[in-house]
Amino acid sequence: SQILGLYGIVIGTVCSGLISYVLSMVMLKKKFGFKNEIVQIIIELIKILISIGITAIVVQFTKYYFIIENRVLSIGGYGILTVVAYISMLYCFKSKALKMKL
């Protein structure tokens, strides 16, 4: 859409991944008695989804009110803002995603 642009694609992808994951876990639990802490994992995924949504709103708000004409500066500036906003939201929600090691 015109409003969210690329962030709308990201949010849609995360939502569909979350739904797919939940359905897969339910099927595994029904068929094989797979025991996993589904509720805790879903809570973490919801925290991440909310963080993405808030990040998209913050960046869109900033892009609307603080326009950067130079394309290179805008990509760099908005990119840095996106990363900082997302990590800040994860930190505010005390997400376990920050503790993961690559």
Image (cartoon, rainbow, N blue to C red):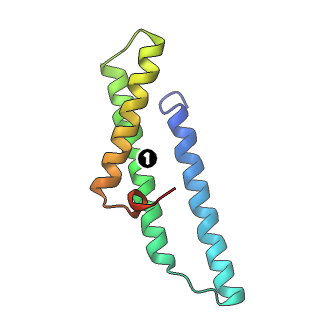
| Rendering quarter of residue 21 | bottom right
Crowding at label 1, few (<14), some or many (≥20) Cα neighbours within 10 Å?
many
In front here: 88 or 2? 88
Which residue does the image show at 33% across and 29% down from the upper left? 61
Whole-percent x, y for residue 55 in the image? 38, 41
For numbered disc 1, what is the local secondary structure? helix
In front here: 102 or 10? 102
Q: Is residue 76 above or below residue 98?
A: above
Whole-percent x, y for residue 19 in the image? 59, 63
| View extreme (front): residue | 102
Whole-percent x, y for residue 18 in the image? 56, 61
Quick one: quadrant of the N terminus? top right
73 on left or right of 24 = left
Q: Is residue 23 above or below residue 54?
A: below
The residue labelled by disc 1 is 52
Q: Is residue 100 above or below residue 8?
A: below
Which residue does the image show at 40% across and 35% down from the upper left? 82
Q: Amino acid at mark 1?
A: Ile
97 on left or right of 2 = left
Which residue does the image show at 39% across and 57% down from the upper left? 98
Q: Is residue 58 above or below residue 44?
A: above
| View extreme (bottom): residue | 33
| View extreme (right): residue | 31
Which residue does the image show at 59% across and 70% down from the upper left? 22
